[in-house]
Image: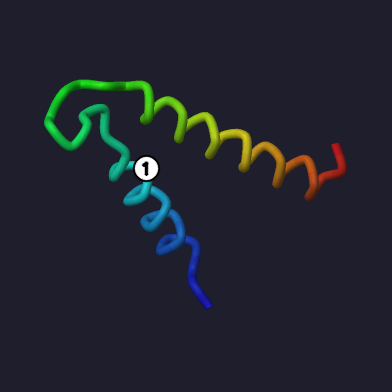
């Protein structure tokens, strides 16, 4: 079973892998913002399910 520090570290790594730049190195925040929004909605949905809000 994972401990909390390891879980937090894994989450930070995933968030750091998100980049504003595409494969060509061009600054494109659109995919970054889309993925961040999906992650936030997923987390919010889990909290609502857990607490019954």
Residue pictured at 37% horizontal, 22% vertical: 30
Q: Is residue 15 above or below residue 31?
A: below
Residue 38 position by quadrant: top right
Where is residue 10 drawn, in percent x and y? 38, 57
When asked about the image quadrant of residue 51, the answer is top right
Callout 1: helix, strand or loop? helix
Can you identify the residue that label 1 sits on? 15
Q: Nearer the viewer, residue 48 or 32?
A: 32
> Could you say where residue 11 lies in the image, as x and y percent from the top left?
42, 51
- The residue most toward the front is 24
Residue at 22% in and 32% down: 22
Front one among 49 and 38: 38
Q: Residues within 10 Å of mark 1 (few under 14, many from 20)?
A: some
Image height of 43 relative to 26, above or below? below
Residue at the outermost bottom position: 1
Q: Name the image quarter holding the C terminus.
A: top right
């Amino acid at each position: 079973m994972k401990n909390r520090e390891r879980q937090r570290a894994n989450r930070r790594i995933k968030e750091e892998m998100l980049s504003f730049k595409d494969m060509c190195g061009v600054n494109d925040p659109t995919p970054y913002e889309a993925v961040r929004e999906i992650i936030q909605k997923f987390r919010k949905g889990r909290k609502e399910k857990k607490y019954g809000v």
